[in-house]
Image (spheres, helix red, strand yellow):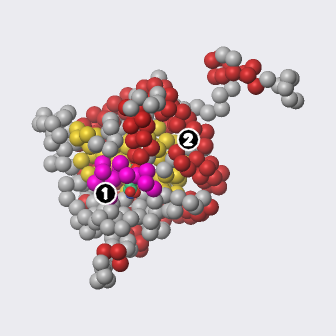
């Protein structure tokens, strides 16, 4: 049945008709807000001026307008606001005061993410706390795992030791679970980490804590602004030895299926905007809930264009988030979460 019997415009004529046949919904309850929580000393505590002279307990991140590094007290306030807006949860990243070769701050039971998790769960118990499980914010060299010893011909000869890193990641995840994390989310891209974390959680009595695996995490230039925020840029080399090649789609599906075999409860595709095909492919292949991470570079581009007056921020953000849902994302992790939740009200 072609034109003139078929007229596609009939169902587009009014808001009522468009709403009736809309295929994709976007709700605040599908959104997760990433937060950067800084150890005391990194950001001025409330009541004192912070280093940048701005809001107490907030340190603006130059590369991500509208996103701040937060003190412990401020992170609880942000969490409260997120919950009041109907956002599903927050994803915590730590900005520690000290770093070392192993990244031991990651599994410190009094580490910054652990303290923030406890404080948020106490203040806003219904808000989900997701924790990023990785070492890069805690290692002095900025890589996501421990290094194989230098072989004497400069830092490029070193690489990240997969198997030695697994135990440290597992320790970190257990420590987050102890603090009350609702979901742990490993982002390091070591092989076998989901299995190692599952086993450690089960052994320690956390069989009910789900794992959201950053399964298809690409070595992406879209993470640039985040690395400034978390101070986690690698001191030498890059992450292409463990994160995925942006050219590879079949491999992304393989990664996701391996994580399913190792016990992942949810899988992630990251970045999101340039990877809609893989959100769809991973969803099809795994049939697990899929999260899309609308990363820092995607956020920064929108903010910069909006600030320049080139685009309508609200319309663009809602269109982007809707497109990720349409691609197959059940959950969207986004720095726009608070704005989007307000606009969706
Ligand atoms: C840590 C981690 C990164 C991001 C999330 N977890 C940075 C990286 O891998 O370099 C990026 C998040 C973003 O860009 O918003 N491994």
Residues tagged 2 and 1 counted as in contact (Cβ below 8 A): no
Question: Measured along the vertical axis of the image, is residue 331 above or below residue 308?
Answer: below
Name the magenta segment's main secondary structure: helix
Of residues 70 and 320, the one drawn nearer to the viewer in this rendering: 320
Side of 1 where 225 appears, left or right = left
Residue 341 horizontal/vertical position (percent): 44, 29
Side of 227 where 245 appears, left or right = right
| Residue 44 visible, this orientation | no
Kindly identify the residue that appears in the image at 60 percent across and 59 percent down. Answer: 249
Marks 2 and 1 sit apart, C-alpha to C-alpha, by 27 Å
Count residues near mark 1 (Cα–Cα under 10 Å), then give few for <14, some for 14-19, many for 20+. Answer: many
Q: Earlier in the sequence, mark 2 or mark 1?
A: 1
Kindly identify the residue that appears in the image at 52 percent across and 62 percent down. Answer: 245
- For residue 204: magenta? no
Mark 2 residue CB less than 8 A from any atom of ligand 1: no
Kindly identify the residue that appears in the image at 13 percent across and 34 percent down. Answer: 47
Residue 83 horizontal/vertical position (percent): 38, 32
Dot 2 lies on which element?
helix
Residue sticking out furthest to the bottom: 152
Image: magenta residue range: 220-233
Of residues 86 and 1, the one drawn nearer to the viewer in this rendering: 1
Question: Measured along the vertical axis of the image, is residue 79 above or below residue 200?
Answer: above
Dot 1 lies on which element?
loop
Q: Which residue is mark 1?
A: 232
Mark 1 residue CB less than 8 A from any atom of ligand 1: yes
- Residue 22, numbered circle: none
Kindly identify the residue that appears in the image at 52 percent across and 52 percent down. Answer: 269
- Residue 324, numbered circle: 2
Q: Quadrant of the N terminus?
A: top right
Question: Measured along the vertical axis of the image, is residue 330 above or below residue 22?
Answer: below
């Amino acid at each position: 049945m072609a034109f003139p019997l078929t007229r596609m415009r009939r169902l587009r004529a009014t808001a009522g008709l468009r709403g009736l046949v809309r295929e994709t919904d976007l709700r605040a309850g599908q959104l997760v807000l990433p937060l950067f929580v800084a150890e005391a000393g990194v950001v001025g505590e409330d009541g004192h001026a912070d280093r940048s002279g701005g809001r107490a307990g907030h340190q603006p991140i130059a590369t991500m307008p509208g996103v701040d590094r937060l003190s412990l007290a401020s992170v609880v306030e942000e969490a409260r606001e997120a919950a009041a807006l109907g956002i599903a949860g927050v994803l915590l990243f730590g900005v520690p005061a000290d770093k070392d070769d192993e990244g031991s701050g990651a599994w410190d039971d009094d580490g910054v993410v652990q303290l923030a998790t406890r404080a948020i769960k106490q203040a806003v118990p219904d808000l989900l706390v997701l924790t990023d499980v990785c070492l890069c914010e805690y290692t002095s060299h900025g890589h996501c795992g421990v290094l194989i010893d230098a072989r004497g011909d400069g830092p490029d000869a070193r690489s990240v030791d997969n198997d030695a890193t697994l135990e440290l990641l597992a320790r970190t995840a257990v420590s987050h679970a102890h603090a009350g994390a609702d979901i742990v989310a490993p982002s390091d891209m070591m092989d076998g980490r989901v299995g190692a974390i599952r086993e450690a959680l089960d052994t320690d009595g956390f069989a009910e804590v789900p794992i959201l695996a950053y399964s298809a995490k690409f070595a992406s230039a879209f993470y640039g602004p985040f690395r400034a925020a978390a101070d986690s840029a690698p001191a030498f080399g890059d992450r292409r030895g463990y994160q995925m090649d942006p050219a590879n789609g079949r491999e992304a599906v393989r990664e996701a299926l391996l994580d399913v075999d190792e016990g992942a409860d949810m899988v992630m595709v990251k970045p999101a905007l340039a990877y809609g095909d893989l959100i769809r492919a991973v969803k099809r292949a795994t049939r697990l809930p899929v999260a899309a991470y609308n990363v820092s570079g995607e956020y920064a581009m929108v903010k910069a264009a909006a600030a320049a007056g080139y685009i309508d921020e609200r319309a663009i953000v809602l269109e982007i988030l809707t497109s990720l849902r349409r691609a197959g994302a059940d959950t969207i992790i986004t720095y726009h979460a608070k704005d989007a939740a307000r606009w969706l009200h």
